[in-house]
Image (cartoon, rainbow, N blue to C red):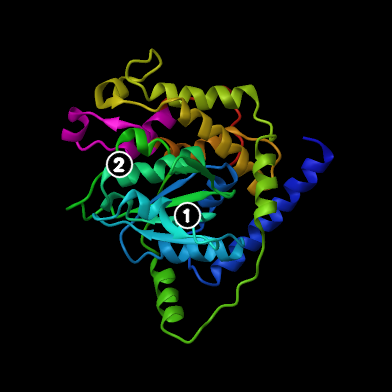
């Protein structure tokens, strides 16, 4: 990193604190969730937020969009939602000269932060339309390609409790999400503060901290953050050890895993480690960064087999055991 990059990296650390301070005016707690969302945004990834209703997932995302000065749209996924309801559609219009011509009406996917609420409520064809836009950053309709304005960032939500009438995302589509982020219940003190704040006449005034241009510059900087070879080797070792057919796989992986994480997991571990280092005021990715991100990166990329399900083994347990079994290639693991 050159001197200009170092100055920009210092700026990111300051801006992170400012962003968190503004969001805290509206959202109580959930600092870990906010950190993962920011890391995903700077890494050009997307997030899957899993949590029961009422945990302020929508409010968190809308507040972040306001603080970052990004255009925000929300789609409520339902069983009757069609792909064109997301991407947009061509309509027959009359021009000023009196001629008839097709005109493309943009759908809600044309935004910079998109909340896909309860993505597992809609059929696979509609899910695929969104996931294609996530992957390609563009929409094709009527034979024409429309580019999505960067930064394009998707946060999809799922309710982990009620599964009746849902269409679970296939593993190949889950792999498109950088992180599987679990949104937990607040603590006693946090819930008391939430109740006091939301039942009063308190109306926070939010400052604008970043804009789209600055975010794009930070996304480019993330790619230039150093990651030592031993850090990359460790990330790759974690992903490979999750595959039961790999020679490095521990016995518990061979016993309980149907299939493990692919190369995209290794990529996201390193990209996320680079972004996390910047957000926490450091100029190089560390083993500690990789370990901190192993759970949200790997959790939705490991499929437990029938034997594991019968014994009550879930992917969180497997990731924790992987972190214990796969030792870092250096005795010194930097503090997270």
Does the stretch in magenta take in 302? Answer: yes
Q: Is residue 109 magenta?
A: no
Q: Nearer the viewer, mark 2 or mark 1?
A: 1
Classed neighbour count for the residue bearing mark 1: other residues with Cα under 10 Å, few (<14), some (14–19), many (≥20): some
Q: Which mark is residue 118?
A: none
In the foreground, 135 or 215? 135
Position in image of residue 236 (x %, y %): 50, 23
Give the x, y percent position of residue 19: 62, 61
Residue at 67% across, 59% down: 210
Q: CA distance from mark 2 to mark 1?
A: 32 Å
- What quarter of the picture does the C terminus occupy? top right
Q: Which mark, residue 169?
A: 2
Q: Secondary structure at mark 2?
A: loop
Occupied quadrant, residue 185: bottom left
User: Is 290 rendered above or below residue 183?
Assistant: above
| Label 1: which secondary element | strand
Q: State the residue at coordinates (42%, 26%).
A: 262
Residue range of the region highlighted in magenta in the rendering? 299-324
Reading the image, the residue beneath label 1 is 103
Quadrant holding the N terminus? top right
Residue at the front extreme of this rendering: 98
């Amino acid at each position: 990193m050159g001197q200009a990059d170092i100055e920009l990296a210092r700026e990111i650390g300051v801006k992170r604190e400012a962003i968190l301070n503004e969001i805290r005016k509206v959202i109580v707690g959930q600092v870990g969730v906010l950190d993962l969302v920011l890391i995903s945004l700077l890494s050009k990834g997307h997030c899957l937020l899993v949590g029961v209703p009422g945990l302020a997932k929508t409010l968190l995302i809308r507040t972040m969009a306001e603080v970052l000065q990004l255009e925000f749209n929300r789609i409520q996924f339902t069983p009757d939602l069609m792909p064109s309801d997301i991407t947009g559609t061509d309509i027959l219009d009359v021009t000023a000269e009196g001629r008839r011509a097709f005109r493309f009406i943009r759908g809600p996917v044309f935004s910079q932060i998109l909340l896909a609420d309860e993505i597992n409520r809609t059929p696979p064809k509609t899910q695929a339309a969104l996931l294609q836009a996530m992957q390609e950053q563009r929409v094709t309709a009527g034979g024409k390609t429309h580019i999505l304005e960067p930064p394009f960032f998707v946060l999809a939500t799922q309710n982990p409790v009620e599964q009746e009438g849902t269409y679970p995302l296939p593993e190949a589509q889950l792999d498109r999400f950088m992180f599987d982020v679990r949104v937990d219940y607040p603590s006693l003190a946090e819930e008391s503060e939430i109740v006091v704040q939301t039942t009063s006449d308190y109306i926070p005034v939010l400052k604008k901290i970043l804009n789209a241009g600055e975010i794009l510059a930070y996304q480019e900087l993330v790619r230039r953050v150093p990651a030592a070879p031993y850090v990359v080797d460790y990330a790759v070792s974690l992903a490979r050890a999750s595959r039961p057919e790999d020679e490095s796989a521990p016995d518990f992986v061979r016993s309980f895993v149907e299939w493990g994480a692919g190369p995209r997991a290794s990529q996201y571990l390193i990209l996320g480690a680079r972004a996390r280092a910047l957000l926490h005021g450091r100029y190089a990715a560390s083993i500690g960064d990789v370990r901190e991100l192993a759970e949200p990166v790997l959790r939705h990329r490991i499929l437990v087999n029938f034997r594991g399900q019968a014994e009550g083994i879930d992917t969180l347990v497997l990731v924790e055991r992987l972190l214990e079994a796969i030792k870092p290639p250096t005795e010194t693991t930097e503090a997270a």
